[in-house]
Amino acid sequence: MPDIAVVFSERIGQDDGPLQGPPDWLIEIRSPGQSTLALQNKVLHCLSNGTQLAWLVDIQRHQLNSKA
């Protein structure tokens, strides 16, 4: 599960329940001590399964990596 998941409104149905499929856009925020490589692998996994845009934010290094 990403830190922030964004889903286009067209994909949200009228019924409550879990989202089916990957988020359209995800944002991962690296915490101190968290492996950058593990987060990159998570982002790549989501992109290969339908996510259209992913951001990896590293606040300590003042970096934002974007992948589409």
Image (cartoon, rainbow, N blue to C red):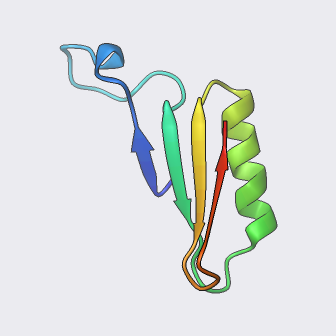
Question: Quadrant of the rendered structure where residue 47 is?
Answer: top right
Q: Is residue 33 above or below residue 9?
A: below
Say which quarter of the image contains residue 67.
Answer: top right
Q: Left or right of 12: which side holds 21? A: right
Where does the image place residue 11, in percent across and percent down from the top left? Answer: 36, 16
Q: Position of residue 6 (x, y in %)?
A: 40, 38
Q: Position of residue 3 (x, y in %)?
A: 47, 58
| Residue 1 seen | no
Identity of the residue drawn at 43% across and 44% down: 5
The residue drawn where x is 59% and y is 85% is 60
Above or below for 30 versus 13? below
x 54%, y 79%: residue: 59
For the point 46% across and 21% down, the residue is 20
The foreground one among 16 and 22 is 22
Q: Quadrant of residue 13?
A: top left
Residue 53 location in percent, x, y? 58, 37
- In the displayed structure, 4 sits above or below 63; it is above
